[in-house]
Image (cartoon, rainbow, N blue to C red):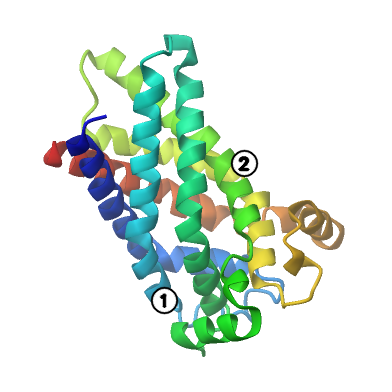
């Protein structure tokens, strides 16, 4: 992959990340409060819907840029030796590695954001200070494992499906898809991936919001899933599935469409 292409992937990914995270932030807040162990109303209801937005604003660009520069470079390295039937596997490997790298930036931002979303009376800086004071740097990475375990299955579904839908549409019309068509494919792929990975998202939210010293604070994803199943059953595992699917479908449209358009403009 040439340096110019790498810079284009980095810049386009960053721009796309900022656009989607800021536009869809209210839906993300609603989803987080629905998944909160204290319940939607006690977590803030519809009040302070932009609580935690500074954390997202700061983390969005480097997080999305890190994902796409890793994704495109890995895809480029593996694509040379892959036959057509191995192409989905190439996309899966590239997306998984992209998520592992991006989560190093995403998780601290996500921890502060989610704690602010369920404590709208506290500022982002107060929550950052409180987290560092009581838990240190480890507190900022609470839920790293659960986030990676959520994001990798999500990407294993979303990105091969997105690439396959683009290829199918390109073949049907006889030329490469436009950016708006890529965005439509991204919406379908994102919505489907969001639905099937919702239980992992609920577990990740519970771990990030758990009080220090509690059972969920250990970061054990399986234990968190079992605990939710025992206390709330299937509805608990799929808490917030509608706003999550809505946000990620819209997010897939904006994120992947903006990425393709920005990348085309830069190359």
Identify the secondary structure beneath mark 2: helix
At x 45%, y 28%, the residue is 91
Q: Quadrant of the C terminus?
A: top left
- Residue 201: which quarter of the image? bottom right
Out of 194 and 243, give the one closest to the viewer. Answer: 194
Return the x and y of residue 243 as percentages of the image width and height: 52, 57
Does residue 120 appear in the picture of this structure? no
Out of 58 and 51, give the one closest to the viewer. Answer: 58
At x 52%, y 61%, the residue is 107
Q: Is residue 42 above or below residue 82?
A: below
Name the residue that disc number 2 marks: 196
Out of 50 and 3, give the one closest to the viewer. Answer: 3
Name the residue that disc number 1 marks: 50
Judge from the rendering whether residue 157 lies leftward or rightward of residue 247; answer left or right. right
Q: Is residue 31 above or below residue 94?
A: below
Return the x and y of residue 186 as percentages of the image width and height: 38, 38
**Are the residues at dot 1 and dot 2 in contact (C-beta closer than 8 Å)?**
no
Judge from the rendering whether residue 26 lies leftward or rightward of residue 222; answer left or right. left
At x 58%, y 44%, the residue is 195
Identify the secondary structure beneath mark 1: loop
Please tell me which of labels 1 and 2 falls first in the chain: 1
Does residue 203 appear in the picture of this structure? yes
């Amino acid at each position: 992959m040439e340096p110019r292409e790498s810079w284009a992937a980095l810049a386009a990914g960053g721009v796309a990340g900022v656009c989607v995270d800021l536009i869809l932030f209210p839906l993300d807040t609603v989803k987080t409060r629905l998944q909160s162990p204290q319940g939607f109303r006690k977590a803030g209801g519809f009040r302070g819907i932009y609580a935690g937005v500074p954390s997202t604003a700061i983390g969005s660009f480097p997080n999305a840029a890190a994902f796409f520069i890793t994704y495109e470079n890995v895809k480029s390295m593996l694509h040379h030796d892959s036959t057509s039937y191995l192409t989905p596997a190439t996309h899966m490997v590239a997306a998984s590695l992209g998520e592992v790298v991006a989560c190093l930036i995403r998780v601290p931002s996500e921890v502060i954001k989610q704690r602010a979303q369920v404590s709208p009376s506290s500022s982002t800086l107060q929550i950052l200070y409180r987290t560092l004071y009581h838990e240190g740097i480890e507190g900022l990475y609470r839920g790293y494992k659960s986030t990676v375990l959520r994001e990798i299955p999500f990407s294993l579904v979303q990105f091969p499906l997105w690439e396959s839908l683009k290829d199918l549409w390109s073949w049907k019309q006889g030329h490469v898809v436009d950016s708006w068509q890529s965005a439509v494919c991204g919406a379908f792929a994102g919505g489907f991936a969001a639905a099937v990975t919702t239980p992992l998202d609920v577990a990740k939210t519970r771990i990030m919001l758990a009080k220090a010293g509690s059972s969920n604070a250990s970061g054990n994803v399986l234990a968190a899933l079992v605990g939710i199943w025992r206390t709330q059953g299937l509805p608990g595992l799929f808490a917030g599935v509608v706003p999550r699917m809505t946000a990620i479908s819209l997010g897939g449209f904006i994120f992947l469409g903006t990425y393709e358009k920005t990348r085309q403009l830069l190359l």
